[in-house]
Image: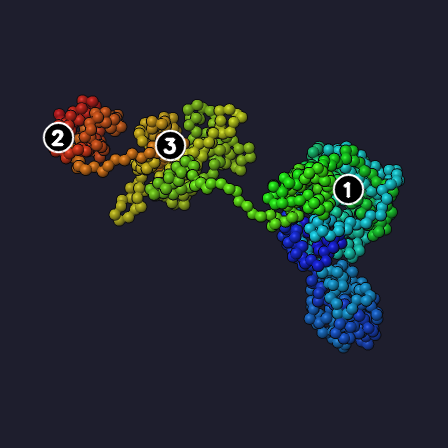
Amino acid sequence: MKVTINWLNEYVDLSGLSAPEIAEALTMVGLEVEVVQPLGRELESIVAGRVLAVEKHPEADKLVLCQVDAGQGPVTIVCGAPNVRAGITVPVAIPGVTTPSGQKIQVATIRKRTSFGMLCSERELGLSEDHSGIMILPEGVPPGRPLSRVLGLEDTLLEVNITPNRGDCLSHLGLARELSAIYDRPLRLPTLSLDREGMEIQGQTSVTLLEPEHCPRYAARLILGVTVGPSPRWLRQRLESLGLRSISNIVDITNFVLFETGQPLHAFDYDLLAENRIVVRTARPNEPFTTLDGVPRILSPDMLVIADGQKAVALAGIMGGLDSEISNETRNVLLESAFFNPLSIRRTAKKLGLSTEASVRFERGVDIEGILPAADRAAQLMREFGGGTVVAGVLDQYPQPWPSVPITLDVAQAGRFLGITVTTDRALDIGRRLGLPMVRKGGDRIEVQPPSFRRDLTRPVDLMEELARMIGYDQIPISYPRGAATAAQEPPALSLRRRIEEILTGLGFDQIITYSFIAEKWAAFFSPAAATQGNIPYIALSNPLSEDQAVMRTSLLPGLLATLKKNLDQRNLNQRIFEVGKVFHPAAESDRLPRENTRLGVLWSGKRYPESFHQKGDLVDFYDLKGVAESLLEALQVQGGTLAPVQNRLWYRPEQAVRIITPAGLLGEMGEIAPAFGDLYDFRESAYVLDLDLDQCARAIQETPTFKPWPRYPEIARDIALILDEPVTWKAIQDEIHSLNQPLIEALELFDLYRGKPIPAGKKNLGIRLHYRSGEQTLTDEMVSPLHQQVVEHMINKFQATLPGAK
């Protein structure tokens, strides 16, 4: 909201107050002043000068020589204006001055006569387009006084940020009312002299209100015989100080009243209204309408319009129509002043993308009881400056008057609420300054009747806020709540996430973050439920940004693979990346929120190590990723993990994909991406992925670590080489050796795998190392050899194995 100090000063005496002081005062009561800008300083260098004498220029028929006193003694100025004469006071631009029109004034020789300045017209001063002669100032202005001061142009513009609940402050009168309360100075309202009585208007026009819900009140006045022309200087100055362009006296008056009172008005050309009447209705389906800005629009039935007897002539509360606007030929004016439902205006303005000074005020709510005073003010000005005759009477459609509901304020409770001491007398004084009718009740209670211009006052806490504003927020002491300080405890899920990020980063992986939206085809493809049940378990977005972001992701793998593809396209061939994020699945019941599951996705592709002179450029394989999974689970203290073949996973290579299972349940999966699936993403490189359910992982973590002392006695390692059938798995061998429950077997490991000659087809040779150790004594070969032989014989019998070289 833009206001000027001079304009505010018409309604409340601001003498003795500087613009920064006024800005600070408004800001401290919740009306933040964002800009304080001086105005009119561009005419400081132009001064008033008195024309002492005028004589004909000897060398030119249309020029005269003027003796002018501009405050520093008489000087000669050559002038060609037809209205120059001795005794008048005029604006003078002395040498060295640049006029607002951009002309730099210098001492000049004109037809052999020296001129020491220029007498200025209104156009040269940027005040109007009038260039018919020099501007004549009022008599009695002393020579040398700056023109900005003579014309009262020295002003200050304030830009105030009005909160949505304070629509009453979107006007000079509204802010003047606030300043009146702040400084306890009387508020001066404009004097109205029009009589609202009379029936003459009813014989010349009518108002039909068909939509009282959208328009609770509509009033109209009729002004006949106006003359449309330029506005008086003071009116142009008022509007131009706010950055508005002067259009004509009639239109300027409606804008003036809007910025004065906050009530938007609209002036119709009465003779252009079909049947000379007004109908307030909603638009017809697909009704065409061209607004004042010349833009044709198609209206919908939820939009309120002002119509004449045949067609729409205005978008209610937003903008008038092109067919009924005020023009130079206008002689009769129908003046609209109304209250429109804020929700209706807001909805229409948003749908059409059309915001105006009127719509901003209607959207926040105007003073429903201020409609007639605003119409009277504008009609009175049109009579005075447009030469019109105001027809007796007012058309006022107001089917259900606004109810003012009283509010009871407990002053003692307000003091406790604000943390200060507030007396009843002080509360009554603040209400008087704010213009709130208050009545003292019993005890500390006060009954307040909110005025119609304060629609934001509906509850006792609203009145408490008014007390706080007027007392001063800076006067309310700061107090802190009492309570025992406790250390913040990180949520377990966040703690687990941080641990995983630290572990994988330490293993050389980079974390990525991808969108939670993916293409529909990937959501269906990567959903285990889709693979096993044949349904479509994903959540579609109502307004997707694109086809590639149409549904909520059901897996982290699409994001990892898309990131791999982008990097491969840039020749970044070695990728170690991971992501921790949520996946989304529909709930079992339609009225419940989707199920969210936190997962970890890891991808490894390219070389195992960076290639160098001491490292081969070997490609990563499945067992590298398996080692990452084992390291991660070991660091997280997840115990008892086993591997099992994966079923119904189209995106894995079948022979290199496993499930990770713990006693707590299925933990996740890992494997190599199938080559056919790589073709879908358009890459040929091998990629290995790990997909873990972190919610399940959290349940499998052994939170209390177990202590195992460092062994005191050395170990003895013995190897076994067994030729086994190809289907026998390493997991089966591990389980069988552990089932022997030999206390001296501390650990075992697979250190070699061989296929090929001389091993028969369908067979494989496994090299197994067993570690023997005692916690009580040093083992000897004599103690370990019999035990080791028993293990070998048991494995041969169990798996029908043979030893290398045996026949």
- Disc 2: which residue: 783
x and y percentages locating residue 287 in the rendered image: 72, 35
x and y percentages locating residue 774 in the rendered image: 18, 33
Outermost residue toward the left? Answer: 782
Q: CA distance from mark 1 to mark 3?
A: 68 Å
- Disc 1: which residue: 371
Q: Is residue 476 above or below residue 460?
A: below
Which of the two residues, 795 or 407, is positioned nearer the viewer here?
407
Q: Is residue 428 above or below residue 302?
A: below
Kindly state the secondary structure of the residue where label 2 is placed.
helix
**Residue at (47% x, 38% y) in the render:** 515
Q: CA distance from mark 2 to mark 1?
A: 109 Å
Cβ–Cβ under 8 Å for marks 1 and 3: no
- The amino acid sitting under disc 3 is Cys
| Among the two numbered marks 2 and 1 on one chain, the one whose residue lies closer to the N terminus | 1
Cβ–Cβ under 8 Å for marks 2 and 1: no
For label 2, count other residues whose C-alpha is less than 10 Å away and answer few (under 14), some (14-19) or many (20+).
few
Q: CA distance from mark 2 to mark 3?
A: 42 Å
| Residue 431 in the figure: left or right of residue 194 | left
Q: Is residue 378 above or below residue 578?
A: below
**Residue at (27% x, 46% y) in the render:** 615
